Image (tube, helix red, strand yellow):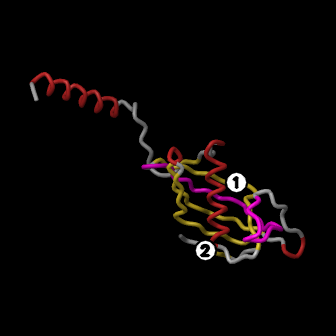
Amino acid sequence: MGIRSWRNLLVLLVALVLAAKLGHFERWEGFREMPMSKKNMDPTLNFFIQSYNNASNDTYLFRVQELLRSQVQLTTGVEYMVTVKIARTTCKKNVTKDPSCPLQSKKLRKSLICESLIYTVPWINYYQLWNNSCQDTEGSCKDLRQ
Protein backbone atom coordinates (compact mmCIF):
# COMPACT_ATOMS: atom_id res chain seq x y z
CA MET A 1 0.00 0.00 0.00
CA GLY A 2 1.51 3.30 -1.08
CA ILE A 3 1.83 6.52 0.89
CA ARG A 4 -1.08 8.03 -1.02
CA SER A 5 -3.40 5.16 0.05
CA TRP A 6 -2.32 5.48 3.68
CA ARG A 7 -2.93 9.23 3.56
CA ASN A 8 -6.44 8.73 2.11
CA LEU A 9 -7.21 6.14 4.78
CA LEU A 10 -5.96 8.49 7.51
CA VAL A 11 -8.06 11.38 6.15
CA LEU A 12 -11.15 9.13 6.10
CA LEU A 13 -10.50 7.96 9.66
CA VAL A 14 -10.07 11.54 10.91
CA ALA A 15 -13.30 12.57 9.16
CA LEU A 16 -15.21 9.72 10.80
CA VAL A 17 -13.84 10.55 14.26
CA LEU A 18 -14.74 14.23 13.83
CA ALA A 19 -18.24 13.40 12.60
CA ALA A 20 -18.81 11.15 15.60
CA LYS A 21 -17.46 13.76 18.03
CA LEU A 22 -19.59 16.50 16.51
CA GLY A 23 -22.71 14.39 16.88
CA HIS A 24 -23.40 13.51 13.28
CA PHE A 25 -23.87 9.86 14.29
CA GLU A 26 -26.67 9.30 16.75
CA ARG A 27 -25.85 6.75 19.40
CA TRP A 28 -28.73 5.12 21.22
CA GLU A 29 -28.25 3.90 24.73
CA GLY A 30 -31.21 1.86 25.89
CA PHE A 31 -34.87 1.98 24.96
CA ARG A 32 -36.60 5.15 23.85
CA GLU A 33 -40.28 5.88 24.11
CA MET A 34 -41.37 5.99 20.50
CA PRO A 35 -44.50 5.07 18.63
CA MET A 36 -44.06 2.07 16.36
CA SER A 37 -44.24 3.01 12.70
CA LYS A 38 -47.32 1.77 10.87
CA LYS A 39 -45.04 -0.11 8.46
CA ASN A 40 -43.53 -2.14 11.34
CA MET A 41 -46.49 -2.29 13.71
CA ASP A 42 -48.73 -4.75 11.84
CA PRO A 43 -46.09 -7.42 11.11
CA THR A 44 -44.54 -7.10 14.59
CA LEU A 45 -47.87 -7.37 16.42
CA ASN A 46 -49.02 -10.18 14.10
CA PHE A 47 -45.84 -12.07 14.94
CA PHE A 48 -46.42 -11.43 18.65
CA ILE A 49 -50.02 -12.70 18.68
CA GLN A 50 -49.13 -15.78 16.62
CA SER A 51 -46.35 -16.57 19.10
CA TYR A 52 -48.71 -16.03 22.01
CA ASN A 53 -51.43 -18.23 20.51
CA ASN A 54 -48.93 -21.00 19.67
CA ALA A 55 -47.60 -21.05 23.25
CA SER A 56 -50.99 -20.70 24.96
CA ASN A 57 -52.98 -23.68 26.23
CA ASP A 58 -56.25 -21.80 25.72
CA THR A 59 -58.81 -23.42 23.40
CA TYR A 60 -59.54 -20.08 21.76
CA LEU A 61 -57.37 -17.70 19.80
CA PHE A 62 -56.48 -14.28 21.18
CA ARG A 63 -56.06 -11.09 19.19
CA VAL A 64 -54.45 -7.75 19.88
CA GLN A 65 -57.02 -5.22 21.00
CA GLU A 66 -54.76 -2.25 21.60
CA LEU A 67 -51.10 -1.23 21.57
CA LEU A 68 -50.69 0.55 24.90
CA ARG A 69 -46.98 1.39 24.84
CA SER A 70 -44.08 1.05 22.44
CA GLN A 71 -40.39 1.53 23.15
CA VAL A 72 -37.61 1.06 20.61
CA GLN A 73 -33.92 0.25 20.81
CA LEU A 74 -31.63 0.01 17.81
CA THR A 75 -29.10 -2.81 17.91
CA THR A 76 -28.16 -5.14 15.09
CA GLY A 77 -31.86 -4.96 14.32
CA VAL A 78 -34.75 -3.26 16.08
CA GLU A 79 -35.90 -4.25 19.54
CA TYR A 80 -39.44 -3.36 20.52
CA MET A 81 -40.59 -3.41 24.11
CA VAL A 82 -44.36 -3.33 23.75
CA THR A 83 -47.30 -3.38 26.11
CA VAL A 84 -50.47 -4.66 24.46
CA LYS A 85 -53.96 -5.54 25.52
CA ILE A 86 -55.11 -8.84 24.04
CA ALA A 87 -58.49 -10.54 24.28
CA ARG A 88 -59.96 -14.01 23.70
CA THR A 89 -61.93 -14.43 20.48
CA THR A 90 -64.76 -16.77 19.54
CA CYS A 91 -62.48 -18.65 17.11
CA LYS A 92 -61.05 -21.95 18.28
CA LYS A 93 -57.45 -22.90 17.70
CA ASN A 94 -56.75 -25.32 14.84
CA VAL A 95 -60.05 -24.34 13.20
CA THR A 96 -59.26 -20.89 11.81
CA LYS A 97 -56.47 -18.35 11.64
CA ASP A 98 -58.87 -15.47 10.93
CA PRO A 99 -57.38 -12.38 12.62
CA SER A 100 -60.74 -10.62 12.63
CA CYS A 101 -62.62 -13.10 14.82
CA PRO A 102 -65.12 -11.41 17.12
CA LEU A 103 -64.21 -11.12 20.78
CA GLN A 104 -65.80 -13.35 23.40
CA SER A 105 -68.58 -11.85 25.44
CA LYS A 106 -69.96 -12.60 28.86
CA LYS A 107 -68.84 -15.87 30.44
CA LEU A 108 -65.78 -16.64 28.26
CA ARG A 109 -64.54 -13.05 28.04
CA LYS A 110 -60.90 -12.74 28.97
CA SER A 111 -58.35 -10.02 28.40
CA LEU A 112 -54.69 -9.75 29.27
CA ILE A 113 -52.07 -7.04 29.39
CA CYS A 114 -48.81 -8.36 27.93
CA GLU A 115 -45.35 -6.85 28.11
CA SER A 116 -43.09 -8.26 25.44
CA LEU A 117 -39.62 -7.85 24.05
CA ILE A 118 -39.55 -8.53 20.33
CA TYR A 119 -36.38 -8.53 18.29
CA THR A 120 -36.80 -7.89 14.60
CA VAL A 121 -34.73 -7.33 11.52
CA PRO A 122 -37.58 -5.93 9.42
CA TRP A 123 -35.63 -5.62 6.18
CA ILE A 124 -35.22 -9.43 6.06
CA ASN A 125 -38.59 -10.22 7.68
CA TYR A 126 -37.01 -11.82 10.79
CA TYR A 127 -38.79 -11.78 14.16
CA GLN A 128 -38.04 -13.36 17.51
CA LEU A 129 -39.95 -13.14 20.79
CA TRP A 130 -37.30 -12.76 23.49
CA ASN A 131 -39.55 -12.28 26.49
CA ASN A 132 -43.26 -12.15 27.16
CA SER A 133 -45.18 -11.74 30.38
CA CYS A 134 -48.96 -11.43 30.48
CA GLN A 135 -51.22 -10.49 33.33
CA ASP A 136 -54.95 -11.06 33.42
CA THR A 137 -56.76 -7.76 33.67
CA GLU A 138 -58.28 -9.30 36.82
CA GLY A 139 -54.85 -9.75 38.38
CA SER A 140 -53.32 -13.22 37.82
CA CYS A 141 -49.96 -13.39 36.08
CA LYS A 142 -48.86 -15.69 33.26
CA ASP A 143 -45.30 -15.84 31.97
CA LEU A 144 -44.60 -17.19 28.46
CA ARG A 145 -40.87 -17.10 27.76
CA GLN A 146 -39.44 -18.46 24.57
Q: Is residue 69 above or below residue 49?
A: above
Q: Image check: 115 left or right of 119? A: right
Q: Amino acid at mark 2?
A: Asp
Q: Quadrant of residue 106?
A: bottom right
Report the magenta residues as a range: 76-98
Q: Position of residue 61 (x, y in %)?
A: 74, 68
How much space separates mark 1 and mark 2, taking CA atoms? 19 Å
Helix or strand or loop: what does disc 2 sit on? strand
- Residue located beneath label 1 in the image: 67
Give the quarter of the figure containing the N terminus. Answer: top left
Q: Which residue is at 74% across, 55% downward?
A: 66
Which residue ends up furthest to the left in the rendered image? 2
Q: Position of residue 32 (x, y in %)?
A: 54, 48
Q: Residue furthest right?
A: 106
How many neighbours does mark 2 have within 10 angstroms: few (below 14), some (14-19), or many (20 or more)? few
**Residue that mark 2 sits on:** 143
The secondary element bearing badge 1 is classed as strand
- Taking the spot 66% from the left edge, 75% from the top edge, the residue there is 141
Q: Position of residue 87 (x, y in %)?
A: 77, 65
Q: Residue 143 or 125: which is nearer the viewer? A: 125
Mark linked to residue 18: none
Check if mark 1's residue and mark 2's residue have beta carbons within 8 Å: no
